[in-house]
Image (spheres, rainbow, N blue to C red):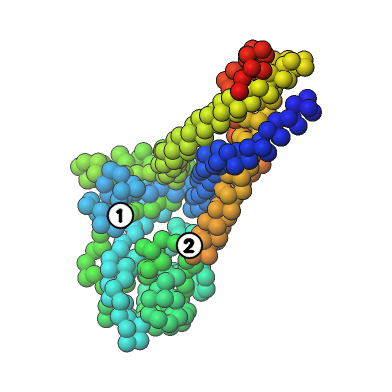
Amino acid sequence: MNDIIILALKGLRYRSLRTLITVAGIVIGISAIVLLVSLSKGFQSTVEELFEQFGADTITVVGGTNLLASSIYAPVPLGERDVEVVGRVRGVEVASGIAAKTFPVTVGYRTEALLVYGMDADTFDTLYGRIFETFMESGRTFREGEKYVALLGSDVAHEVFGRDVDVGRTIKIGDVKFRVIGVLKRVGDPQDDMSVTIPISAFRELVGEEPKYMAVIAKISPGADPGEVAEEIRRELRQARGQEDFTVMTSEDMLNQINSILAVIGAIILGIAVISLVVGGISIMNTMYMSVTERTREIGVMKAVGATKGQIMGIFLVEAGVIGVIGGVVGEIIAVLLAKGVEYAVRSYGGISYYSVYLGSDLLIGAALFSFLIGIISGYLPARRAAELDPVEALRYE
């Protein structure tokens, strides 16, 4: 066995340039697969952690029939009556709407048009406290009864006005003065990082009417079943609105929908990576066929001195497997470097400090074994051809 391995490695060394070119296809495919899996599983873990913080006891209602397609410009806004209907449902502890609109925000002599969120200060801690506390850079969140206070997104506090807008600073939204009580960490979403959050009572004063809500958030009572409460909310809202032009989702529903989208995107990218691996496998097969042709006389000599078909076949299979492993290992190194680069960028510039790519031993070992298997499969037919060569004809080959 040792002799077979030594002969296989010598064969690769003598054709080092061709071997390197052949390895390239495997490198691209394996690096794409490892990078995809590490990034997607890291993102999935981040999303799950975020939803865990948000809580399984939270239900979200948005206008329209697709939660992920809904936005602050949703064609079917929710109103105060909808908040009241949700709040009356058995099993709901508290419900509150989230309103949003663009207003001129002034700091010093500079004014910028920014997105302003309005939330109920009286129920803020119950619904959003655990989320916002996690993302607080400085200061605090709302307290019950506060009105003219504001929380600033990271970009608003540090970049938009060309200066830091610290806690305690006074800003103007429209013509109304607000005191900054907190600054949020950068989350990487421009819509949030470039926003200001104020109590809904102050928001109502700014718009001069009952606000239209982009979403209604409900916290269910301890012990209540989220699925049953969500179904009851759907039934009550459908009766109150006369039609089901809204979406009700639990935190688990939202997580499942996001994971489904990630799975589709991952499958597409994985398909592209598999195509690259198939091309790499064909390249290995072509290289091994060329090697068999070039070494026909050498094969005849080995058979003449007693080499068996199994030994001849083993030499070429080892060569193909080594090409696959080299491509796999190099691809993994490239993927790890790229993944860590993405992780650094997301943490440093995206503001998601808890994002980590997945680089578990099962992924790395599995990718290396998979690349070895690709090499073996691709080298099987050429190796079989070498083993079946007639020794007499092989010795005559020029």
Instruction: Give the residue at mark 2.
Output: 350
Q: Position of residue 77 (x, y in %)?
A: 24, 54
Quarter holding the N terminus is top right
On the rendered structure, is 365 left or right of 95? right
Checking the image for residue 305, the label placed there is none
The residue that appears at 72% across and 16% down in the rendered structure is 303
The disc labelled 2 sits on which kind of residue?
Gly
Q: Earlier in the sequence, mark 2 or mark 1?
A: 1
On the rendered structure, is 74 left or right of 374? left
The residue that appears at 55% across and 60% down in the rendered structure is 344
Q: Position of residue 264 (x, y in %)?
A: 41, 38
Instruction: Give the residue at mark 1.
Output: 71
The disc labelled 1 sits on which kind of residue?
Ser
Look at the picture and state if 161 lies above or below 255: below
The residue that appears at 38% across and 44% down in the rendered structure is 249
Q: Callout 1: 10 Å neighbours few (<14), some, many (20+)?
A: some
On the rendered structure, is 362 left or right of 260? right
The residue that appears at 24% across and 69% down in the rendered structure is 207
Residue 140 visible at all: yes
Q: Nearer the viewer, mark 2 or mark 1?
A: 2
Residue 23 visible at all: no
Measured in 3D between alpha carbons, the distance from the residue under mark 2 to the one under mark 1, in whole angstroms, is 21 Å
User: Which residue reaches farthest left?
Assistant: 242
SS assignment at label 1: loop
Q: Callout 2: 10 Å neighbours few (<14), some, many (20+)?
A: some
Q: Nearer the viewer, residue 69 or 341?
A: 341
Q: Position of residue 296 (x, y in %)?
A: 63, 22
Q: Nearer the viewer, residue 227 or 360?
A: 360
Q: Nearer the viewer, residue 357 or 182?
A: 357
Q: Position of residue 124 (x, y in %)?
A: 43, 63
On the rendered structure, is 2 left or right of 328? right
Tally of numbered tags: 2
